[in-house]
Amino acid sequence: RDFCLSRGLGDVYKRQVLLVTNEGFYRVDGGVARYVRNILDARAISQEVAAAHGVDLSWHVAERTLGGRVDDAALEQAMEQYIRPGHVEFHPLVDPRRSNSEPDHLEHFVALGAAVGQLVAHLARSVDSVLVVGGMSMFSIAPRFVLRAADQLGLRVSYVHMTHNPVISAHGGADRPEAYSDAVMGHLARSDERVNVGWESAWMRRQYASVYGIDEDDMIFARAGVPTSDAKFRRQSDATVHHTLRALGVPLDRPLALSWGRAGAGKGFSLLVRACRAIDDRVVPVVLNPVPNQSLAHTVAALESSAVLLDGQDDDVISALCQWEGTLTATFLSWGEAASVTPIEAALMSDGGGSVVSAVPTGVYRELVVPGRNGVLAEDRSVDGVARMLDCLTRMPLQERVRLGAVAAEDARRHHDFATNWRTTLNEALGRHLHVISRSAAQRRDLQRQRFLYAPGPDREAVR
């Protein structure tokens, strides 16, 4: 029996939103963590959207413990900001790996997925329905267990998978655990309306549509963004910028090429160092990572590069570097970013100050950087390609760099403001959630049967 039918017409239905993540409480040094924090900080917007749908939302975050390693300072900050005031309930997920250094295997993804399913079954006891928002391949098998719990226990749930990981990879084939777990999620999103894909970039939207046959119109808008009014985007005084960079040993008499992010091998930091060395270090690379990047330091030493490597710096330092008159470019050279926000941050920090956003033509960069309009793209992702791009930037007039930077900042504010995008995302996700949970199990089975018998193909004709 539909227990909700016993409620009065004026009652507000209780719904829960569960955010499933690999970072955000124990770690806050990556883009996913910032996205999670941005969602939790957007409580006023979320309440407005929920009220418009006639529901009341409570928020939960589940994060795996990364081999038992906990960033105590980050957790205490999260406790003080979100948990103790009662804004969020936190649920740590035990990491199925024996150590943090052990690579993920399929059984780890399965264990994490089962843990999420069990958590949803627990949470659903006290509310009318649960909307789960997850991302990353390690959690892409979780929808299977969430739906299993829903079917076995009669729960009202839906799942939105954020497209954080590319499903077309240049680093391995179908034997990767990610390929299998993503395929499970892709099949469910194609066949079961309770699972949706939230696209964080048009590039990822096309990938999921082509690989899994999901109609692009069935996906949820979830474009990545940043809080464009954040204090880190304010203009610093010239004296402050000069003092900050001099104190860090950054050379102020030569043009700089800036890049930052997590110290992963695919981020392209060594590519930047090698490209600058290829033009005799006429442009000095400056790289910022959250923790010391020993591998990059060895590369710098071996090449006798003039690169400046910084770690553990806050956003004010990055902002100062973007605003420094000698910084030619903030450049991003990853092999395949799904929804990078660092080029957006770079554009807002510089805001037409002369630092140009540049990148390689991979992943979302081709979507964010339009050559001649708001930045510069290399011909290809190679040492020679990046070196030629940097060489061109050394000869670009300041007036042109200022123009590109100003347009980039305006594009960022117009298309990548987190508050604006999140309002759209939550409205779509919550609207679909309420629509889906209104169906009976028999109605869902009939719909799944129709989807199977009349699956749209390339020619858009019925396939039996």
Image (cartoon, helix red, strand yellow):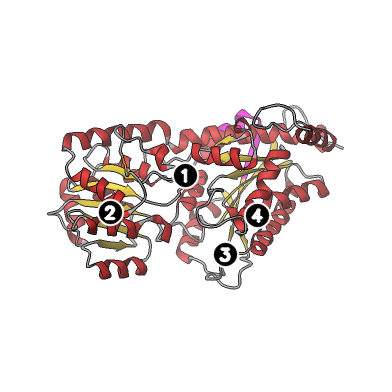
- Residue 450 figure quarter: top right
C-alpha gap between disc 2 and disc 4: 41 Å
Numbered circle sitting on residue 317: 2
Marks 1,4: beta carbons within 8 A: no
Find disc 4 in the rendering and name its residue. Answer: 180
Seen in the picture, residue 407 relative to 33 is either above or below; the reply is above
C-alpha gap between disc 4 and disc 3: 23 Å
Element class at badge 2: helix
Mark 2 surroundings: few (<14), some (14-19) or many (≥20) residues within 10 A = some
Q: Residue 77 at x, y = what percent?
A: 46, 58
Mark 4 / mark 3, whichever is N-terminal: 3
Seen in the picture, residue 34 relative to 248 is either above or below; the reply is above
Segment tinted magenta in the rendering: 49-58
Find disc 3 in the rendering and name its residue. Answer: 65
Numbered circle sitting on residue 339: 1
Q: Residue 430 at x, y = what percent?
A: 63, 35
Which tag is nearer the camera, tag 1 or tag 2? 1
Which tag is nearer the camera, tag 1 or tag 3? 1
Q: Residue 210 at x, y = what percent?
A: 59, 39
